[in-house]
């Protein structure tokens, strides 16, 4: 699946007129050193302005992306053309054909309310590349380029409102709430791990105090230190294992429901849960190891004398 380009693309709302009216502005912008290319299109897929929900003749409701633009528009966004029908109409992605239920060779489709709709062509499904790490120099260049584009637009169309935003900024704004939620989840996850580790340490301290007599008797009858230590640690790891078996299905269900709300998402691979289980096991083992070693090294004579 191709990746749509997001790097250094400035999206400017057209408040200046039709194609013929804004041609002087486009020519001026192409002559600017900070502008590599200029394309015209009807919105961008990221903004949701291209998403169309409609009713099919059979009563089904479907939702998909449709776009319309010139060649430069496709090139700038990194959209790969799969089929060009050579007619002036909206282009659909591969997913749209599956939703509508028609072959990709079709050049039109039926809508319950709008009748026959022409298809300009097909572009491959795409995913937006992750945001790259912020770099101060790049941010300065972007700000300067945006300011220059705004100045040129003001010269060609004085008094008109200029609204422009980089796609990377739009992505960051669109996922601002999710980023905030992830930070909160991370903080509470770290706190819960810390509290759990402290709880295990306290519980192991109490449990080991109860096991001193049993351990002392085993050592009197010849039990080795390594065997006693292993048995003490495993008694706690069994509880951690039971909690892991119970927690994984619940975590998978919640994460799967959350991720299903995104068109492009990571997969919940088995190794993610295995890795989480190993980390938890290491933290749990480290939490009870000190008390286990202390109890396993107990002098049987001293312990039984107190009893």
Image (cartoon, rainbow, N blue to C red):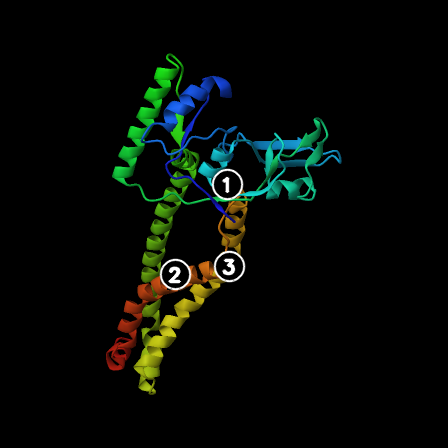
Q: Earlier in the sequence, mark 3 or mark 2?
A: 3
Quarter of the rendering occupied by the C terminus? bottom left
Q: Nearer the viewer, mark 2 or mark 1?
A: 1
> Which residue occupies the foreground of this view, 244 or 2?
2
Say left or right for 296 vs 108.
Answer: left
Q: Earlier in the sequence, mark 3 or mark 1?
A: 1
* Residue 285 position (above or below residue 260): below
* Residue 79 numbered mark, or none: 1
- Where is residue 78 shown, x and y percent of the image? 47, 41
- Where is residue 281 shown, x and y percent of the image? 39, 64
> Which residue occupies the foreground of this view, 126 or 69?
69
Residue at image coords 32%, 63%: 287
Q: Nearer the viewer, mark 3 or mark 2?
A: 2
* Residue 299 numbered mark, or none: none
Residue placed furthest toward the bottom: 222
The residue that disc 2 covers is 280
* Residue 246 numbered mark, or none: 3
Residue at image coords 50%, 61%: 270
Pointers 2 and 1 in contact (C-beta within 8 Å): no
Say left or right for 264 vs 136.
Answer: right
> Which residue occupies the foreground of this view, 37 or 248?
37
* Residue 79 position (above or below residue 158): below
Q: Secondary structure at mark 3?
A: helix
Residue at image coords 28%, 79%: 304
Q: Quadrant of residue 285?
A: bottom left
Pointers 3 and 2 in contact (C-beta within 8 Å): no
Say left or right for 78 vs 199.
Answer: right
Pointers 3 and 1 in contact (C-beta within 8 Å): no
- Real-space Cα distance between discs 2 and 1? 43 Å
Q: Quadrant of residue 272?
A: bottom left
Q: Within 10 angstroms of label 3, few (less than 14), some, or many (20 or more) residues?
A: few
């Amino acid at each position: 699946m191709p990746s749509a380009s997001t790097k250094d693309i400035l999206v400017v709302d057209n408040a200046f007129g039709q194609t013929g009216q804004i041609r002087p502005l486009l020519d001026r912008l192409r002559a600017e050193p900070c502008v590599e290319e200029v394309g015209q299109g009807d919105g961008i897929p990221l903004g949701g302005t291209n998403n169309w929900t409609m009713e099919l003749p059979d009563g089904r409701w479907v939702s998909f992306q449709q776009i319309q633009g010139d060649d430069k528009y496709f090139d700038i966004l990194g959209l790969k053309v799969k089929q060009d029908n050579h007619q002036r109409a909206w282009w659909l992605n591969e997913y749209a054909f599956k939703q509508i239920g028609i072959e990709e060779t079709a050049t039109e489709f039926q809508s319950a309310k709008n009748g026959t709709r022409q298809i300009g062509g097909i572009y491959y499904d795409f995913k937006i590349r992750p945001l790259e790490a912020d770099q101060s120099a790049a941010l300065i260049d972007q700000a300067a380029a945006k300011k220059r584009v705004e100045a040129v637009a003001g010269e060609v169309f004085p008094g008109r409102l200029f609204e422009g935003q980089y796609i990377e900024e739009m992505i960051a704004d669109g996922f601002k709430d999710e980023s905030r939620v992830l930070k909160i989840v991370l903080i509470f996850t770290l706190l819960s791990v810390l509290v759990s580790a402290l709880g295990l340490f306290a519980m192991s301290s109490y449990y080991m105090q109860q096991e001193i007599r049993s351990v002392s008797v085993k050592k009197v009858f010849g039990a080795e230190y390594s065997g006693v230590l292993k048995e003490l640690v495993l008694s706690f790891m069994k509880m951690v294992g039971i909690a892991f078996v119970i927690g994984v299905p619940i975590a998978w269900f919640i994460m799967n429901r959350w991720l299903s709300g995104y068109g492009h998402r990571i997969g919940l691979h088995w190794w993610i849960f295995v890795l989480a289980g190993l980390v938890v096991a290491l933290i749990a083992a480290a939490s009870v190891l000190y008390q286990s070693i202390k109890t396993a090294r107990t002098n049987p004579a001293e312990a039984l004398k107190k009893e």
